[in-house]
Image (cartoon, helix red, strand yellow):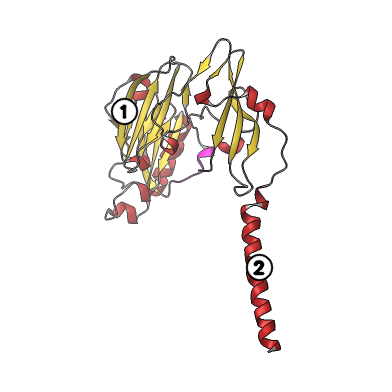
Amino acid sequence: MGIYRKNILVILLAIAGFILSIAYGYFFRNFIRQPDFKLKDSQYKLLPEGVKTERYSVTRLFKKSYRNNLSKPYYFASRKNIIFIEHHEDKRKQSFYRLDSLGNVADSITFDNDYSTIIRGDYIVQNTAYSSWILDGDTTTKKYIELNASVDWPEDKVEEEFSRLNQKATDVFYFKFDRLWKYDDPNRNREIDKAIFLINGKWLALYGKKLYVNLDDLPGAQLPNLVPDSKAFDKPNSIVYVADYQKINLVKEDNWYGVAYINLFYKTDTIKIKAKLFPE
């Protein structure tokens, strides 16, 4: 009987330990030592509560909730407009919206083949063509000037041409073979990449085996995003940053998960916004 009692006691202790671990997970771990945010809550407002200063007010730009489908803004200072990118749920299309200085949607364009579509400076490039829509509103795509479309140049000639174009180009980008060719194309098996070079407003294309290089070592005009990356969102800057942050719990230790107190700067005003942030 002593052995049975001992086994029952072990089982009961195990069950009690399991229950306590659950209680800790759901109750105790959410207790966080934080300063009082009452003053912050009186200074910072959620958008539905009305965010404004003496001269400016802030409203939602899009009535539709895009969540992760809408990119951060890309700002073109020379033309005083902003570009947003919408990633469609089916992943096969990507739309670009141009906003004027008043926040109105002035123009838009949609591209198929989403995975290869990217902004490079004032151009939208894909693996087969590029667009100057950002520059001039032209909705037609343009073909690259292909220097060796037959892909029959010897490697030393490709390397020599790559070096020459690289020195003249104001921007360089490349498409790796696995995102360039169809599965049954021989060039895919040959691992033929495609490098594109922007020279005097024209994009030239060069094909070659294993053309991939570190893009940081090449000329580039990839447009910097207007809003800092989430990893640097709490670093003070001249545009917008999180001035303070109230965590909801300790579950999401490596993510923004709580209430953010955001400083948005416009001219001489500091616009204070409160926002609920959730992990992506």
Name the residue tied to disc 2. Answer: 16
Residue 213, position as x, y percentages in the image: 49, 44
Q: Residue at x 61, y 22 (%)?
A: 238
Q: Which residues are magenta?
A: 210-216
- The vertical placement of 39 against 33, above or below, is above
Q: Nearer the viewer, mark 1 or mark 2?
A: 2
Give the residue at the far front of this rendering: 1
Is residue 59 rendered to the left or right of residue 141?
right
Residue on which disc 1 sits: 109
What is the chief secondary structure element of the magenta stretch?
loop
Q: Is residue 256 magenta?
A: no
From the viewer's perspective, is 51 left or right of 92? right
Position of the N terminus, as image quadrant, is: bottom right
- Label 1: which secondary element: strand
The part of the image, by quadrant, that contains residue 228 is top right
Kind of residue at disc 2: Ala
Picture residue at 61% right of the left edge, 42% below the top = 248
Looking at the image, which is closer to me, 136 or 73? Answer: 73
At label 1, the amino acid type is Ile
- In the image, is residue 214 part of the stretch drawn in magenta? yes
